[in-house]
Amino acid sequence: MLYQIHENQRALKKPLADLAHSASRAYASPWSMLGQNPFTKNLSAGYDLLHRLGKDYKKPEFNIDSVEMGGVNVVIHEQVEMDKPFCRLLSFERYSNDVSTLTHIKNQPVVLIVAPLSGHYATLLRDTVKTMLQDHQVFITDWKNARLIPVEDGEFHLDDYVNYVQEFIRHLQATHGNCHVLSVCQPTVPVLAAISLMASRGETTPSTMTMMGGPMDARKSPTSVNEFATSKSFDWFENNVIYRVPANCEGAGRRVYPGFLQHTGFVAMNPNSHAQHHVDYFKDLVKGDDAGAQAHRKFYDEYNAVLDMDADFYLDTIKVVFQDYSLAKGTWDVKSVDGQLERVRPQDITTTAVFSVEGELDDITGTGQTTAVHAMCSGIPEAMHAHLEIEGAGHYGIFSGHRWHEKTYPALKSFILSHNT
């Protein structure tokens, strides 16, 4: 019922948001009947802000057209490597007319970036991808919006996420010999499970696995996110945040954790900060600070674009990661594609180097939650373990922004290169 009410409100807001957008442009026009003065600038800015508060935010695009490599401009072409019901594996092909650059490109490490399935789209890692493309062949998981997936495509559990990751790794191994895996936040847990299961079966595991800001052991330094997950019962989550997709969507009838509820939770974590950002945006528009206004649009175009998560996946994650701590306790059994239960044993990994990254000020994944991976992976030789704490970095700062460029990426690049096999 709540989801349908939201859809009705969204339909009602659209014409108002469109009208506000038109009014904003009209008052900003040099041909406005009222002319350009402080009054019309305030009107234009107010209508623009109203438009952005009421508009729909669609799935963003990566829009990575080129990167610079050694002074040479390399063209990027995004394409779908694999297409599965709940996820696409994207590749970013690089092209250049410079022969030496092409030769260099072919010999660079292959990296699979496993993006979070936790509300935002994979484009949240746009800065991560664009930076990595300078020195690596990059692939990324592009998780689909569950509201667009027909119920005929079946259920999607945390176990399925693990199996998807294994399938993507095997695909890259078959094509490129081996690969490196980078996971950010939520996927650190299923990525470790995927690689652990491969090791237990005697399969070739990736050359390296990098875990960035992930809840490997959510018992350590619990944040407000962890506390919320443990303060409610499993039944509470199932009864209060799970809804069926309305009839007007492709995924009609599918049980989901709706994106609009997730977005409400994101904003509720720092309401005063978001309010101030919108006030600053209004002021930038009035004084004509185009750079400041565009920075605001760029951030919130990404931040406000959210997807629905399949209910089974979300509820599994709450139970396994945040309530039972199954990975940390060594009690997690994952159902394989053939229906067999397999125990996740990180200690069976012996040939994959492991690198953990944490932000000093991370308020989503507390200190020590990610570094817990090292104790779990006791079978990996000590020389193949590495850790980095980024001073002054919050959760997003470890994979985007100046700290990512200046601190995280140089260390990550060196780690991958030193273990490239």
Image (tube, grey):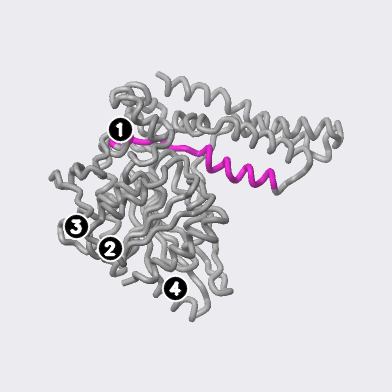
Q: Position of residue 189 (x, y in %)?
A: 31, 47
Of marks 1 and 2, the one in the foreground? 2
First in sequence: mark 1 or mark 3? 1
Mark 3–mark 2 Cα distance, whole angstroms, equals: 10 Å
Mark 1–mark 2 Cα distance, whole angstroms, equals: 30 Å
The structure residue drawn at horizontal position 48% and vertical position 46%, both measured from the top left corner, is 395
**Residue 142 belongs to magenta span:** no
First in sequence: mark 1 or mark 2? 1
Q: Mark 4 — residue?
A: 105
Mark 2–mark 4 Cα distance, whole angstroms, equals: 23 Å
Q: Mark 2 — residue?
A: 352
Q: Mark 1 — residue?
A: 315
The structure residue drawn at horizontal position 85% and vertical position 32%, both measured from the top left corner, is 33
The structure residue drawn at horizontal position 65% and vertical position 34%, both measured from the top left corner, is 276
First in sequence: mark 3 or mark 4? 4
Image marks 2 and 4: residues in contact by CB distance under 8 Å: no
User: Dot 3: within a 10 Å radius of its alpha carbon, few (fewer than 14), some, or many (20 or more) residues?
Assistant: many
Q: Mark 3 — residue?
A: 348
Instruction: Identify the amino acid type marked 4.
Output: Ile
Image marks 1 and 4: residues in contact by CB distance under 8 Å: no
Q: Nearer the viewer, residue 419 or 31?
A: 419
User: Magenta residues, as a range?
Assistant: 292-316
Instruction: Identify the amino acid type marked 1.
Output: Leu
Instruction: Identify the amino acid type marked 2.
Output: Thr
Instruction: Identify the amino acid type marked 3.
Output: Asp
First in sequence: mark 1 or mark 4? 4
Q: Nearer the viewer, residue 135 or 21?
A: 135
The structure residue drawn at horizontal position 74% and vertical position 37%, both measured from the top left corner, is 283
Image marks 3 and 2: residues in contact by CB distance under 8 Å: no
Mark 1–mark 3 Cα distance, whole angstroms, equals: 28 Å
